[in-house]
Image: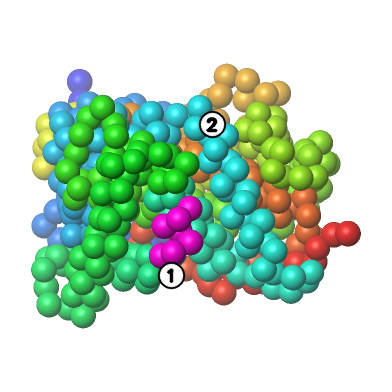
């Protein structure tokens, strides 16, 4: 039988834990875990949240049905940016949109996607020169956005409109707002609304062209989506494309940056990966998805980077009906919070949790996949990240080209994260010195 509600972490009068959460949510949840265990409560003013950070409890809870833990109420911040798409849409619309995206992200297209990824990466590397410095935050973010724009909107759009797209997109992203009303007359929110209107006007002619001539070679992922069996209006199609670009700009670029930083902080693991990479063709235009799939050490290092530096700091669900976790009952109306940075360092699942040790995900130590299944950075249940395999392909390809062709060194041996809520990314500038081999 479930006991009472989870114990609440002490906080300030009236405000409770709100200020500490806004200042550093991961530190607050780490302190709550140490004091109260893997399931506890926070008080944010009048609102209550349960925090679930134990690996087993997290896996079980995040898999609860949508009727128990819906995401739509907590993803309404997406609407002013991209419209009612994905988690911001009603549940049935979300299922329809997700079903339309699945075929376009399927593995049979990954060979074409890989060719575009390596082409964009070679173009960036070609602009660097023989030696110098690049920014593991800003430069990899720009690269990831260029890759996403090319794949999702086509090479012609990328070549003609990349600069304008980026300008509009950054204004939209700067208008993300979790707490304030979305229509306040603040300058950044007004810029967001103007940029969103301009962005839709920029993309709409390409959508019209796709509906007339749905050739994926010319129009990229947009052609798959616009001609999906499930039809959507223009606003939804464009919103879906933009939220996919947003995922690449926000999460893939940040995880790629942290992965590179961790590898450069651990030269022994990097040297072993470079030996493995030597089996790849010297010409990346000849690479196949199978070639990258066989880079087992690189894959394990990426998993370890996602464990130590997950870019998703918080996953949030609304509690629609009461449920039990850890012997407690969570009341309806509470938020349910998952915190990958804390869950990923549970010593019962990850011994010596602060050490960078990719072998913990290798077949000798994790043949049952227990360690890998404890990672929460890609979500879980119905809302597990659709683009996880695509993001994995991009990170493998970019890292293979960097580690295989350059000597790299961190300018700052321990780069800090950027401040603020949301996605955890390296603070820019995060300089990396490079020198081309050969």
The x, y position of residue 182, in whole percent, is: 14, 65
At 47% across and 68% down in the image, what residue appears?
418
Q: Depth-wise, is mark 1 or mark 2 nearer the camera? A: 1
Compare marks 1 and 2 and give the one earlier in the sequence. 1
Outermost residue on the right side: it is 438
59 is higher (above) or lower (below) than 16: above
Q: Quadrant of residue 362?
A: top right
Location of the N terminus (image quadrant) = top left
At 55% across and 38% down in the image, what residue appears?
112
Location of the C terminus (image quadrant) = bottom right
Outermost residue on the bottom side: it is 187
Closer to the camera in the image, 145 or 69? 145
- The label shown at residue 163 is 1
Q: Is residue 384 left or right of residue 238?
A: right
- Where disc 2 sits, the SS reads helix
Would residue 14 be counted in the magenta stretch?
Answer: no
180 is higher (above) or lower (below) than 53: below
Mark 2 residue crowding within 10 angstroms, few (<14) / some (14–19) / many (20+)? some
The x, y position of residue 343, in whole percent, is: 45, 42
146 is higher (above) or lower (below) than 5: below
The x, y position of residue 246, in whole percent, is: 37, 55
- The label shown at residue 372 is 2
């Amino acid at each position: 039988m479930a006991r009472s509600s989870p114990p609440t972490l002490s906080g300030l009068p009236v405000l409770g834990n709100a200020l500490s959460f806004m200042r550093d949510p991961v530190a607050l949840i780490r302190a709550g875990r140490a004091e109260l265990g893997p399931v506890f409560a926070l008080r944010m003013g009048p609102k209550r949240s349960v925090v679930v950070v134990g690996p087993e409890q997290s896996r079980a809870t995040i898999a609860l049905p949508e009727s128990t833990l819906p995401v739509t109420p907590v993803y309404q911040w997406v609407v002013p940016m991209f419209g009612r798409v994905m988690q911001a849409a009603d549940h049935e619309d979300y299922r329809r949109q997700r079903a339309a995206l699945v075929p376009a992200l399927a593995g049979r297209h990954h060979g074409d996607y890989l060719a575009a990824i390596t082409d964009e990466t070679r173009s960036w590397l070609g602009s660097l020169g023989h030696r110098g410095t690049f920014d593991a935050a800003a430069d990899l973010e720009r690269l990831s956005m260029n890759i996403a724009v090319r794949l999702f909107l086509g090479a012609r759009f990328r070549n003609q409109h990349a600069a304008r797209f980026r300008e509009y997109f950054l204004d939209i992203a700067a208008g993300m707002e979790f707490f304030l009303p979305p229509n306040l007359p603040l300058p950044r929110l007004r810029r967001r609304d103007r940029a969103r209107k301009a962005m839709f006007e920029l993309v709409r002619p390409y959508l019209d062209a796709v509906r007339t001539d749905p050739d994926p070679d010319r129009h990229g992922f947009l052609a798959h989506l616009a001609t999906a069996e499930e039809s959507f209006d223009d606003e939804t199609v464009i919103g879906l494309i933009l939220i996919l670009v947003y995922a690449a700009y926000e999460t893939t670029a940040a995880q790629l940056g942290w992965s590179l930083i961790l590898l450069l902080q651990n030269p022994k693991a990097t040297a072993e990966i470079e030996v493995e990479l030597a089996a790849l063709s010297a010409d990346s235009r000849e690479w196949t998805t199978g070639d990258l799939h066989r880079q087992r050490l690189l894959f394990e290092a990426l998993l370890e980077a996602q464990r130590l530096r997950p870019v998703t700091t918080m996953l949030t669900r609304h509690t629609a009906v009461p449920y039990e976790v850890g012997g407690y009952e969570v009341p309806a109306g509470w938020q349910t919070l998952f915190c990958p940075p804390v869950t990923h360092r549970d010593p019962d699942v990850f011994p010596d949790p602060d050490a960078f040790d990719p072998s913990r995900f290798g077949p000798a130590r994790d043949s049952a996949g227990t360690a890998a299944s404890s990672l929460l950075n890609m979500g879980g249940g119905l809302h597990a990240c659709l683009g996880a395999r695509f993001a994995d392909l991009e990170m493998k390809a970019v890292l293979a080209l960097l580690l295989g062709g350059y000597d790299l060194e961190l300018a700052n041996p321990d780069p800090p994260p950027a401040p603020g809520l949301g996605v955890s990314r390296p603070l820019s500038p995060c300089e990396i010195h490079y020198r081309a081999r050969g």
